[in-house]
């Protein structure tokens, strides 16, 4: 199958114009922050662990659920890839800043300046294996989450709040499990000395916590989706893709006519 790169690029540009800027910004910001916050552990026991990335990672999956519901699975995956590229670029900037001479304001503690400054630089710069692990894990998890969310939605007979919650809950817990497990297998297993049992248990525990966050915040996501539909958000992209979805978008050309 031949891919028209010019057409795909144009479609991607239209998509970036169509997704509301606040949603796109919050999504990208959550991806960047959850990788930075992953440097801080919240729970560290012999059989389970949890890092601070969980504070914002729910926002990434909530954003994907909203985008895939309104714009379709291809759009959500495309936005996820864009977020990963931006996150990698920001990680590069972090590394450059950490390598630059100078001291952080928080390092001015008598007798500990060098240690604190070095620790802050190390945290900001991150490690290559952590960045590689987080990027790979989120890329795989975003594809799983988006495809599963769309697949479940297509097999639900109704398009109401309950249907939105079902597809969101199922895709989130599985997507988060894939994210956590992939990161643990790439990073924790080889660099932190975890065993396979710890990787699986921690991935499952993190997925359950993320599911709880999804239960709390998904009503907001559902209201956003309905608002987008009523306000005809993304009309240009939907007409370009001619999306046929089980939602209120019965026929793109009809609903999103000028």
Image: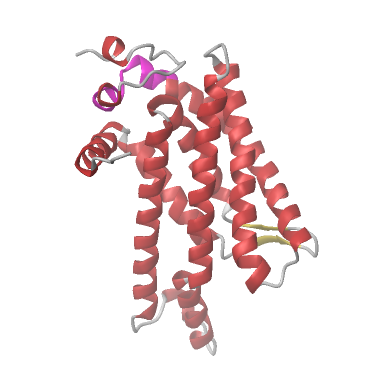
The residue at 43%/23% (across/down) is 225
Figure quadrant of the C terminus: top left
**Image position of 58 with respect to 239: above or below:** below
Indicate the position of residue 1 as horizontal and vertical percent values.
33, 39
Residue furthest right in the image: 46
169 relative to 98 in the view: left or right: right
Residue furthest bottom in the image: 111
**Image position of 252 with respect to 21: above or below:** above
Indicate the position of residue 171 as horizontal and vertical percent values.
59, 35
Secondary structure mostly taken by the magenta-highlighted segment of the chain: helix
Indicate the position of residue 35 as horizontal and vertical percent values.
50, 58
Q: Is residue 85 magenta?
A: no
Indicate the position of residue 22 as horizontal and vertical percent values.
35, 38
The one of 234 and 96 positioned closer to us in this rendering:
234
The one of 136 and 229 positioned closer to us in this rendering:
136
Q: Is residue 235 magenta?
A: yes
Magenta-tinted stretch: 226-238
The residue at 76%/53% (across/down) is 201
74 relative to 193 in the view: left or right: left
The one of 23 and 176 positioned closer to us in this rendering:
176
The residue at 56%/55% (across/down) is 53
């Amino acid at each position: 199958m031949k891919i028209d790169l010019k057409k795909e690029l144009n479609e991607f540009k239209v998509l970036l114009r169509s997704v509301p800027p606040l949603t796109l910004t919050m999504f990208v910001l959550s991806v960047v922050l959850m990788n930075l916050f992953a440097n801080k552990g919240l729970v560290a026991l012999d059989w389970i662990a949890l890092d601070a990335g969980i504070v914002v990672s729910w926002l990434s999956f909530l954003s994907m659920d909203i985008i895939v519901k309104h714009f379709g699975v291809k759009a959500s995956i495309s936005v996820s890839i864009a977020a990963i590229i931006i996150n990698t670029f920001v990680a590069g900037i972090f590394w450059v800043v950490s390598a630059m001479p100078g001291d952080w304001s928080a390092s001015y503690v008598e007798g500990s300046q060098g240690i604190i400054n070095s620790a802050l630089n190390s945290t900001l710069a991150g490690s290559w294996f952590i960045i590689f692990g987080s990027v790979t894990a989120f890329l795989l998890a975003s594809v799983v989450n988006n495809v599963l969310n769309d697949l479940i939605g297509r097999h639900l007979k109704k398009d109401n709040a309950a249907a939105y919650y079902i597809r969101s809950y199922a895709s989130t817990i599985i997507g988060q499990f894939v994210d956590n497990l992939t990161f643990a297998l790439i990073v924790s297993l080889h660099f932190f000395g975890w065993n396979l049992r710890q990787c699986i248990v921690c991935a499952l525990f993190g997925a359950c916590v993320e599911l709880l966050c999804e239960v709390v915040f998904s009503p907001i996501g559902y209201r956003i989706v309905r608002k987008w539909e009523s306000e005809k958000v993304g009309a240009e992209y939907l007409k370009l893709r001619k999306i046929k979805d089980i939602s209120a978008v019965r026929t793109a050309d009809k609903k999103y006519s000028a």
